[in-house]
Image: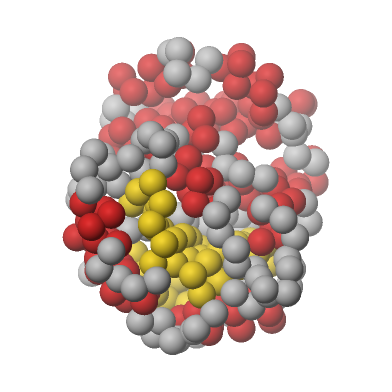
């Protein structure tokens, strides 16, 4: 990504990775195309779906850009792939089963980002089926530790400063790790309670035990590459405690395969990504709510 040019200022890119969930994607696109803000681009990244279902869904909507990854990269790789093609000053990240509830949602996003120039990532107010929102809609914005992938907005400058997601994570935990880098670059992660997102949580391609295994192993990876040297033992202890606490919720075969397997050799991973954040950043993140 390059710095803003006059053509990108005020534009918002809406990035939607998708894999297998064509019908869910149609619902998301219907709501997204209906957004009243005009200076927008909508980009769908087909993460190697083994048929034309995602492409067929996208062709039903005028001016939606279709991209296809060269192979299945996982959700994180698909987000990176799509972000490289975004031209907006801001990037709205949605899942293929989440959408802005209000037709003027993008106007609310632009207003929020303009009023909070210190914000690198705005965490949007997500509602799950038959559940409430994360925060009261009329509450004040506050600084938090991280955000959820199904509804957030990046300032372009924050991506340039912090860099891409770590693709080896494959899925789960990528937001927390990148949040550390964003904070270390001088940006904040803040709630945007007035911007409402509905997350349908499609059952397709959703395997909670497998996802929890990735969450646990990526927790450890994050601590090994981002914790200041003298805090690595404490960070690893926290990661193993998380894994132990969720041992009944995770696919332990996946956990140990990821931890000791050949897909991501741990020492190679550490050598490639080890770049600790400042101690002040590390403690500031711990002090914030997620």
Residue 39, x across and y down, in percent: 54, 79
Residue at figure coordinates x 45%, y 71% from the top left = 125
Residue 99 in which image quadrant: bottom left
Q: In the picture shown, does residue 204 fall above or below 227?
A: below
Residue 154 in which image quadrant: bottom right
19 sits left or right of 71 in the view: left
Q: Nearer the viewer, residue 100 or 251?
A: 100
Residue 42, x across and y down, in percent: 44, 67
Residue at figure coordinates x 50%, y 20% from the top left = 264
Q: How many marks?
A: 0
Residue at figure coordinates x 59%, y 33% from the top left = 222
Residue 177, x across and y down, in percent: 60, 42
34 sits left or right of 271 in the view: left
Q: Can you say which quadrant of the picture contains the C terminus?
A: bottom right
Q: Nearer the viewer, residue 46 or 28?
A: 46
Does the image show residue 195? yes
Does the image show residue 136? no
């Amino acid at each position: 990504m390059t710095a803003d040019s006059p053509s990108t200022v005020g534009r918002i890119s809406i990035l939607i990775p998708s894999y297998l969930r064509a019908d869910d994607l149609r619902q998301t696109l219907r709501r997204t195309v209906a957004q009243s803000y005009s200076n927008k681009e909508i980009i769908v990244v087909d993460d190697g779906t083994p048929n034309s279902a995602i492409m067929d869904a996208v062709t039903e909507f005028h001016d939606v850009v279709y991209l296809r990854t060269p192979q299945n990269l996982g959700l994180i790789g698909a987000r990176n792939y799509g972000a490289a093609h975004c031209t907006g000053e801001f990037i709205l990240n949605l899942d293929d089963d989440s959408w802005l509830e209000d037709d003027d949602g993008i106007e609310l996003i632009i207003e929020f980002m303009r009023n909070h120039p210190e914000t690198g990532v705005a965490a949007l107010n997500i509602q799950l089926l038959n559940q409430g929102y994360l925060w009261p809609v009329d509450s004040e914005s506050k600084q938090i530790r991280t955000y959820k992938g199904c509804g957030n907005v990046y300032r372009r400058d924050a991506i340039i400063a912090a860099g891409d997601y770590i693709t080896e994570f494959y899925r789960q935990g990528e937001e927390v790790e990148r949040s550390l880098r964003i904070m270390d670059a001088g940006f904040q992660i803040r709630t945007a309670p007035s911007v409402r997102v509905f997350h349908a949580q499609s059952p397709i391609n959703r395997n909670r035990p497998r996802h929890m295994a990735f969450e646990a192993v990526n927790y450890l990876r994050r601590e090994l590459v981002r914790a200041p040297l003298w805090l690595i033992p404490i960070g690893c202890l926290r990661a193993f405690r998380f894994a132990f606490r969720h041992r009944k919720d995770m696919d332990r075969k996946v956990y140990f395969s990821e931890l000791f397997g050949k897909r991501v050799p741990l020492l190679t991973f550490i050598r490639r990504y080890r770049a600790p954040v400042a101690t002040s950043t590390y403690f500031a993140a711990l002090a914030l709510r997620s």
